[in-house]
Image (spheres, helix red, strand yellow):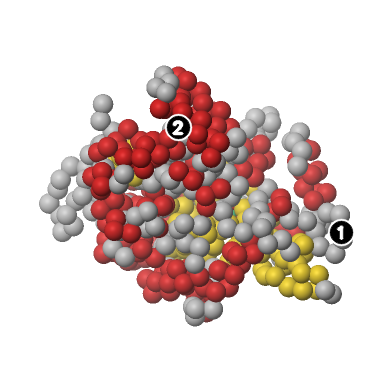
Amino acid sequence: MTHISTLQKPRLAETRREPFKVYTRRDLDRIEPLQRLPEETRFEMRVVSSVLPFRVNQYVIDELIDWDRVPDDPIYQLTFPQRGMLEPGMFERMDEALRGGADCRAIQALARELRAKLNPHPAGQIQLNIPRDARGEPINGLQHKYRETVLFFPSQGQTCHSYCTFCFRWAQFVGDKSLRIATTEVERLHHYLENHPEVTDLLITGGDPMVMKAKHLRAYLEPLLDPRFEHLQTIRIGTKALTFWPQRFVGDEDADELIATFERLVRAGKHLAIMAHYNHWQELRTDIARRAIARLRATGAEIRSQGPLLAHINDDADDWGRLWKTQVRLGIIPYYMFVERDTGARAWFEVPLARAWEIYRGAMQQVSGLGRTARGPSMSAGPGKVEVQGVAEVRGEKVFVLRFIQARNPDWVQRPFFARYDEQATWLDQLRPAFGEERFFFEEEYDEMLAGRGLKS
Ligand SMILES: *Cc1c(COP(=O)(O)O)cnc(C)c1O
C-alpha cells in the first residue's frame, strides 16, 4: 500500500496545479533529500515517529526546507522528528523494541504507554471545555471555554497538510479515536450556537479545517448567514495551510469555490478571520505563499497570525522581528506569541518564561506599532491565557508581572498579578505567588470550577 497520494487531477489554468503528495513514517525511505543523511538519523526518526505523529508533504520538502542547513533549518525542525523530542528513557525503550524486532502489537502497546505519559490533553481540554446539553450529555466536537468564543472541530478537518513536531493536539493524530475531539453533525453546531446568544465568535479548528473540501465547509458556514445567527459576528478559521499548502487557496481544484464562499460571508456582514499559524519568516518566502495571502485578503477576510515560541525553531528575537515585519508588509495582523504547551515533545521545544519574555521584548523593539499587536508570551493554561508582561522588582523582590488575556471567568481578565521570579520556570504550574502569598487570586475559584466537574487541580 502506498501512502503517497495524488489528490488533484491536472487542469488547464493560469496556475500550474501541483499534486498534493504526502509522506508518513512508512515513507521515510522515499523522501529523497533524507537519503543524504546518516542511516542512524533516519532510524531515530523511525523511533520518534512510532510515538509522535509524522506527516510532511512535497511542497514543504522542496520549497520550505533549506536542506543545506539541516539539521538546524527551522522548517526541518518543524516537521521532521528528532531524537531529542522524546525523553532519553522513552527513546531508549522504543529504540530497543524496534531494533529487537518486536511485533506490531507490542510496538503499538508501548507507543500507547509512552503517549499516555506525555500529557496528551493539556489544560483540561476534554473534561472542562466540552459543553453539555440539557440532559448533561457532552456535546462532542465543541469546546466552549471563554464566554464569547466557541471552538468547533469539524470531523472532516481533523488532519493537517503536514504535522508540526510540537503540535499540542498531537494526540488526535495517533491511533486511539477516543482521544479525538470531533463531530460530524452540522446541526449540533448550529443548535448550540442558536441557543447561546452570548457567543460572538466561532473558531473552526482542528487539525486544519483547510484540508476540507469547500463543499463540506460550506455546509457548516453558509447556514450561519441566517438571521438566527445574528449574534455571531466573527467566523475564525484556524489553519496552517498558508504555510504547508498555500495551493489550497490558489490552484487547488476547489480553490475558487472556497474563495467565493469566503467572499459571500464577508459580503453578508460577517467578520471572517483567518487565524494563520506561523512560526518562522521562512514560511513566507515562496511566491505561492504570498499569492495565497493576497487572494485571501482580496475576499475581505483579515489574516491574523499566531504561533508558539520554540527552541530549535524560533527562539530568537531577530527571527520574530523579521516574521512580524514581513507579516505587516503582507497585510497580516500579528496576534499571539504562545508559550509551548506542557505536552508531547515539550522537552525539546520549551523555553523558560524569562527567556521567552526577553525574546518577545527584543522583537517588539524592532517593529513599528503595527507589528506590536502581537500579545505574549502567552500560556494557554487551564484557568485561561496568561501573559508574561515582564520582569520587575517590587520592594526588593524580583517578580514576574502577569495578566489574563482571556479567562474562564471574565472578571479575571486584565488584572495584573505577580509570581516569584524563577529563571527556569517554563509553565504556569511551576510559578508561585510573590510577596509570600499562599495562592494566586484566581485559584480558589478555579478549584471550585474543577470540583464542579469532579476534578482536582
Ligand atoms: C485562545 C482561545 C480562544 C480565543 O481567545 P481570544 O482571546 O478571543 O483569541 C477561544 N477558546 C480557546 C479554548 C482558546 O484557547
Q: Is residue 317 left or right of residue 22?
A: right
Residue at disc 2, secondary structure? helix
Report, in whole angstroms, how far the alpha carbon at label 2 lies from the one at label 1: 46 Å
Q: Which amino acid does label 2 sit on?
A: Asp
Locate the N terminus and report the quarter of the image it occupies. top left
Q: Nearer the viewer, mark 2 or mark 1?
A: 2
Q: Residues within 10 Å of mark 1 (few under 14, many from 20)?
A: few
Determine which residue is flagged by label 2: 95
Q: At 40% from the left edge and 39% from the top edge, which residue is drawn?
A: 44
Q: At 28% from the left edge and 33% from the top edge, which residue is drawn?
A: 3
Q: Which quadrant of the figure has residue 431?
A: bottom right
Horizontal and vertical percent position of residue 262 = 38, 56
Horizontal and vertical percent position of residue 167 = 49, 46
| Res. 216 visible in picture | no
Q: Is residue 192 left or right of residue 41?
A: right
Of residues 236 and 420, which is closer to you in this image? Answer: 420
Determine which residue is flagged by label 1: 437
Q: In this view, does 288 lie to the left or right of 261?
A: left
Horizontal and vertical percent position of residue 198 = 64, 52
